[in-house]
Amino acid sequence: MTTASVSLGASVSSQSRFMQLALAALLGIFVVGFVGFSHIDAVHNAAHDYRHSMAFPCH
Amino acid sequence: MNLFRNVVFVAAIAGLVAGVVLACMQAYATVPLILKAETYEKAGGGHHHDHAAAPAANSDAMSTAAPAGNAMSSAAPAADDLASAQEDEGWAPADGFERFAFSVVANIVTGIGFALVLVAVSEFAGGIGNWRQGVFWGLAGFAVFTLAPGLGLQPELPAMPAADLLPRQVWWIATAAATAIGLGLIVFRRSLPLTILAVLLIVAPHIVGAPQPDSFETPVPEGLHHQFVVAVTLTNLVFWLVLGAVVGVVRGRFTGTATSLRDSFA
């Protein structure tokens, strides 16, 4: 489907490629989860309007 | 970690741009409606603005209210006044600039988070080669993270009743995941049985059904809520389109061979 020359990480092994992309996706999920779904009061209050505006479950 | 670094770089730029755009749209379209709904919340006091994680340490402030552990229930007594309600919730940014600033930060940080997911997943499928491919990926992100969860759990305003927080979060995340897998199967597997499976995956969370509150009674007017649902849905649509398009542009600059990826999608 694609070749190494047009991907973001030219010339990395497919296993390393999978690990790096999976790591990036997990990092993104963690960031969104912490800001949008954390039960810590201060985090909830800081991002309160954001959570409502993104239709994340809130309160 | 060359690839990882590049993914983070592209995601950081796209998330920053889309996050700022979303924060600006929210300041005009959704936040005024949230503030309006909060006036009903403070006036009515029918819904205890709290969540299941309320620490027991605040129990002195809760003396007239339900035990902190299940204060989430919409049946919590209305006895607690505004002052104690604020104390219950711990630190919060001051209204005005501070509150707005934290919203902007939340938008940018999660914008980068969503961008990381988008860029990483799209790299598995060959990468987003240009802004137009990015727009289609953005539509998929909108369907996964806004449309599908929003069908069962409508965007809610303060002072609106809702089921317990944790089951709703679980349903939200499961629905987004099922929809994402379903869309991926339809677009990239090109097989009829897998497409049928994908449709089942996308429909299943809505057959199970999202956790709903015991009663939908709320002091918030129906018109205000409807306006909010429209505002949330449209601002998120624009956010995802911008995010996808910017990823396409930045990644194209990065690789310099954007157009050769065209046939990797659709």
Image: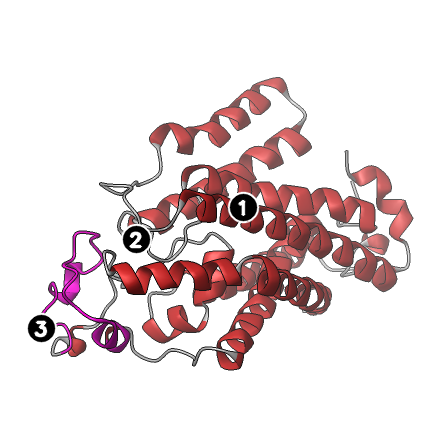
Residue of label 3? B63
Main secondary structure found in the magenta portion: loop
Measuring from the top left, give residue B15's x and y in whole percent.
66, 64
As measured in the structure, the alpha-carbon distance from the residue carrying label 3 to the one carrying label 2 is: 25 Å
Residue of label 1? B146
Q: Is residue B167 visible?
A: yes
* Residue located 48% across and 43% down the image: B226
Tag 1 secondary structure:
helix
- Which of disc 3 and disc 1 is earlier in sequence? 3
Please, what is the three-letter code of the amino acid marked with disc 2? Leu
Of B102 and A27, nearer the camera is B102
Tag 2 secondary structure:
helix
* Residue located 43% across and 79% down the image: B93
* Label 3 close to label 2 by CB (< 8 Å): no
Measuring from the top left, give residue B245's x and y in whole percent.
77, 53
Q: Are marks 2 and 1 on the same chain?
A: yes
Residue of label 2? B166
